[in-house]
Image: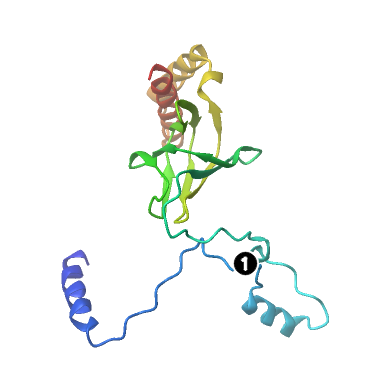
Amino acid sequence: MYRFAPRLLIRGIAGGSRRSAAPARPFSTDLPAAPTEDATFVEAWRKVAPNVDPPKTPLAFMKPRPSTPASIPTKLTVNFVLPYQSEIANKEVDMVIVPATTGQMGVLPGHVATIAELKPGVLSVHEGNDVTKYFVSSGFAFIHANSVTDIIAVEAAPIDHIDPTLVQKGLADFTQKLNSATTDLEKAEAQIGVDVHSALNAALSG
């Protein structure tokens, strides 16, 4: 399939002059000022239950983002949430560095819109000369075009709250489990434990 990609690209470019330009695709951050309803869902609902008001869908609860500014802001707005609490909410910072699966990624105001998967590693939040570091297990970073970044992690803790002794013990335990594993499931579970504790160890030593 990849062998034909260049031909398809060339064909698309060659045929582009004969087609009208496609309308610009809006950013996901450019939501309407007022919540809108899912017209397709409402229409289908009224066919089934015309006498009952349709329930609200997730679209109705989405809060509009500020529009993308014409100039790059001086600060980056960060939201950092876990399944059970919010660590950072609408905080203006200078930069964040996230442990993406592709490597450490710095995010400044005006960063291109991106979705990055997170791996076990250090998330650092920079405010002037102050740097706050968290260890995150996994998650995603949603970097929007309007200099807002939403970071969602499965688990996280400030680096200074982590006990190095427990990390060393956990690394030794999971390494032993990996060496003695006999099934694919046991190997996978042990490997995850080794990877996470290795990343914790590197975060503490770094």
Image quadrant in which the C terminus is located? top left
Nearest the camera: 25 or 199? 25
Residue tagged 1: 33
| Left or right of residue 135, residue 36 in this image | right
114 lies above or below 31:
above
| Image point (16%, 66%), residue name | 3
Coloring applied to the structure: rainbow
* Residue 93 image point, x, y percent: 50, 38
25 lies above or below 62:
below
* Residue 1 image point, x, y percent: 22, 67
Q: How many marks?
A: 1
153 lies above or below 52:
above
Nearest the camera: 89 or 157? 89
Given the image, on which type of amino acid does mark 1 rest?
A: Ala
| Left or right of residue 87, residue 18 in this image | left
The image quarter containing residue 4 is bottom left
* Residue 175 image point, x, y percent: 40, 21
Residue furthest to the top in view is 165
| Image point (39%, 78%), residue name | 23
* Residue 179 image point, x, y percent: 38, 22
Nearest the camera: 88 or 188? 88
Q: Would you call the spot at circle 1 few (<14 residues within 10 Å), some (14-19), or many (20 or more)?
A: few
| Image point (48%, 14%), residue name | 164
Residue furthest to the right in view is 51
Nearest the camera: 92 or 179? 92
| Image point (40%, 29%), residue name | 195
| Left or right of residue 160, residue 122 in this image | left
Could you say whether the residue bearing mark 1 is in a helix, strand or loop? loop
